[in-house]
Image: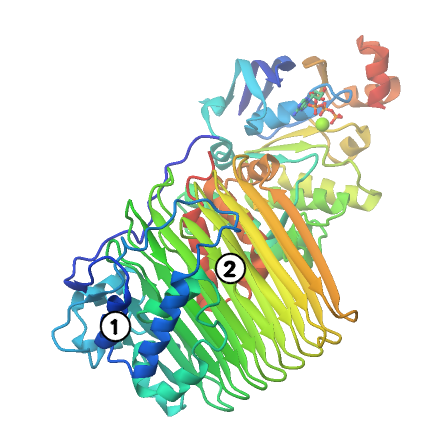
Amino acid sequence: MKELIKREYEHGFVTEIETDTFEPGLNEDVIRRLSEIKQEPEFMLEWRLKAYRRWLEMDDPTWAHVDYPRVDYNAISYYSAPKKKEDMPQSLDDVDPELLRTYEKLGIPLHEREKLAGVAVDAVFDSVSIGTTFKEQLAEAGVIFCPISEAVQKYPELVEKYLGSVVPAGDNFFAALNSAVFSDGSFVYIPKGVRCPLELSTYFRINAANTGQFERTLIVADAGSYVSYLEGCTAPMRDENQLHAAVVELVALDDAQIKYSTVQNWYPGDEHGKGGIYNFVTKRGACQGRNSKISWTQVETGSAVTWKYPSCILKGDNSVGEFYSVALTHNYQQADTGTKMIHLGKNTTSTIISKGISAGRSSNAYRGLVKFQPGAENARNFTQCDSLLIGDRCGAHTFPYIESRNKSAIVEHEATTSKVSDEQMFLCRQRGIDPEQAVSMIVNGFCKEVFKELPMEFAVEAGKLLEVSLEGSVG
Amino acid sequence: MLSIKNLHASVEGKEILKGINLEIKAGEVHAIMGPNGSGKSTLSQVLAGNEAFEVTEGEVTLNGENLLDLETEERAREGIFLAFQYPVEIPGVSNLQFLRTAVNAMRTHRGEPEMNAAEFMKLAKEVSKQVDLDPAFLKRGVNEGFSGGEKKRNEIMQALLLQPKLAILDETDSGLDIDALKVVSDGVNALRAKDRAILMVTHYQRLLNHIVPDYVHVLAGGRIIKSGGRELALELEERGYGWLGIKEDEAAAAN
Ligand SMILES: Nc1ncnc2c1ncn2[C@@H]1O[C@H](COP(=O)(O)OP(=O)(O)OP(=O)(O)O)[C@@H](O)[C@H]1O
Ligand SMILES: [Mg+2]
């Protein structure tokens, strides 16, 4: 097959904007300054410092199936924010028009006139949130959806109660770092019995060079509530690697449901493996209450290196955890991703559907742990792990771990590896279909079970994203 | 319409086609018969542009245009259609989506607007009835779990949807029960048109009772060793391939 022309990463532009950016380097003073800028209450600063001291004693994890040069944490700047005329924009009208244009380019309208129908959006640019849409409508329902920096000030008791309750500050190296220096992110609280009237969505954008992005998201669904939340991410093309170390915590109380979807499209680096984002993320949800449910759906196409395991702690009896994942790697991308399902309560069930697609010289690993604790009477898990290879220079690996301390637990595990075959390609092309379109159609078919879990609008977006990400894979 | 001159092709360094000459005019139906392994599928695949085969000599033109310079998908858009002897499965991709993508690729090539999902659904349902396939098959993955006969009917459905200039049917009759054979033959006869040519590979003269060919060719050892009218097929049925000077074991393999 002939080599097809590669299209460039379409979100790779840089926004020229005046910023306040910290000098690179990390120490307690940096953390104090950060906390001061954010006008945080005392408990927050103490929490950060404690996390920082823990982090100093920890080392980069080395067990994942990824290979990258050690990050120099003192070469990174820990805060970058667009310079604003006033202190904080009170409404989107106060936001720098250049920023709004950035989000328009990304296809995310923040302006009141052209808001995304039925979706409330929070936009995080480098280290700060620049605006949230549909604020009033959400407030009417009693839903809190705001930048976490705002929540720290306005709802300190909720933040203090839940922050770190699922991912403790010292959980792992990157979580500790994030806890010390997280700059912004989203906070969501859905009151008892409320079905959130809109899809909630946060778009993260790394713009500044040599800046780490450490966002923190906390979602609490009180008893009997429901929320569907989506995050999207992009970054400019830069030759240097950039670090993104986020923490996401979800808490579902009795009968509550949280559906968390991610479309991750950080800059993956160029076709020679230069540049790209290091995406080291800790995501975990606690099904605290009885009959609660947490569902993770992720479509991961970006980043140079991904290290990410959205997990569920199934504590409440009859609680349900789900993980639906599509991870695509191309060129020199590396991904080590999967999930942990920790069954504590009775009759807890979990489902894992993982679809890994490897193209180019990339490496794609699924790593999953299913654990049944002694109290997990009649718990069950179903795992399906499928790998699809495009070409013969890429790698796919599966590392499933099962630990059972309860005899009544039932685990089912299925795994397949397949290739986009020459025969399939020939059939498509014989019917007049372009090779690139053929690959994307075959890959989309492979991912169907996961895409159907995404909110409608984003399923289409995800399909297109795969198509763009696969460009140049047919050669 | 199609002109093949001294066509040689090999796979993995082994020569399979050793100088094929064939002229097919618009409106004609040609049948190709011949022992197993003689190169019938290879000829079909080479015409459709399968890159697993290397053309080492000769030329092929479609309406005067050099076919061998075109990519597989370009040939398809110029009107070459191949019904596969062994249709491959594409899991998760619905037949409907696959067919609509194909039809729209052809339409775009011809400068016609794409068909939307609703328009296409209507068309696809009609055509699926024509080959006696339940429209439920449109929702299933391409050939996924289809029986042998269902796959063959699915191929003919595609030919009817894509309306090619030259339809190459590689053993579309094999593995069909008597009723299905009738359905598929009716489908092929529906394809017959003044401006369309059909090249069909078959082992069985009984197909030629349903689809009466204008010419019958015998392909053996990578060459066309005999051509005639439809009576040649009857003669082959009666006498086998032996009298044509083909080695006994090859002839035995053909029956
Ligand atoms: N991909 C391939 N690799 C190696 N040999 C091949 C390949 N494809 C075909 N051949 C060989 O080429 C020869 C012709 O095969 P072909 O499939 O064209 O025969 P055929 O006439 O269609 O036979 P049948 O009647 O059994 O379908 C056979 O010897 C076959 O083994
Ligand atoms: Mg054959």
Which residue position holds label 1? A32
Mark 1 sits near ligand 1, with its Cβ under 8 Å away: no
- Vertically, is B141 above or below B46? below
Residue displayed at 38% across by 64% down: A177
| Quarter of the rendered image showing ligand 2 | top right
- Asked if residue A389 can be seen in this view, the reply is no
Which residue position holds label 2? B117
Q: Which mark is residue A164?
A: none
- From the viewer's perspective, is the residue at label 1 or at label 2 nearer? 1
User: Looking at the picture, how far across and down is residue B176, in whole percent?
Assistant: 80, 41
Answer yes or no: are tags 1 and 2 on the same subunit: no
Instruction: Name the foreground residue: A280 vs B239.
Output: A280
Report, in whole angstroms, how far the alpha carbon at label 1 lies from the one at label 2. 58 Å
Amino acid at dot 1: Arg
Q: Secondary structure at mark 1?
A: helix
- Residue at the farthest top position: B245
